Image (cartoon, grey):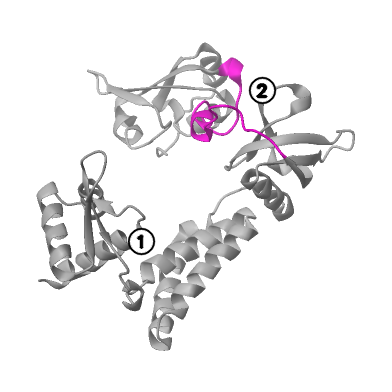
Amino acid sequence: MSFSKAQDLIRLARLAATRRTGIGLDEICEEFAVSHRTAQRMTEALETVFTNVEAVDGADRRRRWRVADPMLDRLQLRQATAIEALEIASRTARGDGRLRHAAALEDLRDGLLARLTPKDALRTETDVEAVLLAMGSVTRPGPRVNLAPAVLDAVIEGLRGPLRLRLRYRTEEAPERIIEPHGLLLGHRSYLVARQPARGEDLLNFRMDQILSAQTLDESFSSAPGFSLEDYAAQSFGVYQDPEQYDEVIWRFAPRAAARAAEFCFHPKQTGETQEDGSLIVRFHAAGWLEMAWHLYQWGDAVEVIAPEGLRRLVEHHRRSDFDALP
């Protein structure tokens, strides 16, 4: 058995041990990017090498493999990539003001380091730091709004409950609000998605940077039936929601920009159609014309808004022809 195959077998054993219901062939194909036949050979090797492998056929008639009492925690595999990922995630969380998440991620990172020998831990930390220094994305250049950690912490506690929150906005004349948090949309402008019972059952957006204080109340509530933050977020182009603007959006990218535009995911439910002249038509349904206009400006005159009409009017006098590069 080659060294790489041995690594894969150990990883497969750990997956079979740590997943409550074991692992199936489809999951092996996805995890290891292998064919169905190769996945079968891997399970055969798993049963050959380990004596405590259980193969169970589920109600769906699909077989799953599980390693019982594996003692695999004694196999000290290199954790450099995992530690890199945790370090990046913790720095991002701390930059966002999510101090509780940052602390939890740092604890996980320290736990992995503690399992290594002092020599390996030092080498891993050095390697991780070198990678992080080379990744400009960790520093997240560009403007952003800082969120108050205390407010964000209270919001996360409310979401975990779920528990109602008492909010105060920065404007002095604004009264306190009792709201029921449903989700958090993080971006260049972050919003708390919540119901305000005093204003009805509709979900509303509250700007996180305008919340002066937030207090978690000892009052639980029932979430809106069928609510999905993913579906809710897909109704907008960025993070702003405006039901009156929700409509089909159609953009036409000129032939010279079509290849570049095809590399972008403007919306998770978009479709693209290449035209005979080489241009690209992109379609999706969303709201948020202002955020769309901010993005479209970068494309200069290489993009044309076909619909909706309100967005077309908003950008028609701002399509520049003197930009030297595309986004």
Mark 1 residue element? helix
Point out the image quarter for the N terminus.
Answer: bottom left
Q: Is residue 31 magenta?
A: no
Q: Which residues are magenta?
A: 220-245
Residue situated in front as seen by the camera: 242 or 53: 53
Residue 128 seen anywhere in this rendered image of the structure: yes
Which residue of the protein is positioned furthest toward the right in this rendering?
173
Question: How far from the left and from the top, in percent, is residue 4?
Answer: 17, 68
**Which residue matches tag 1?**
18
| Mark 1 and mark 2: Cα distance apart in space | 41 Å
Question: How far from the left and from the top, in percent, is residue 82?
Answer: 40, 66
Which residue of the protein is positioned furthest toward the top in this rendering?
309
- The mark lying in front, picked from 1 and 2, is 1
Q: Residues within 10 Å of mark 2 (few under 14, many from 20)?
A: few
Q: Residues within 10 Å of mark 1 (few under 14, many from 20)?
A: some
**Which residue matches tag 2?**
202
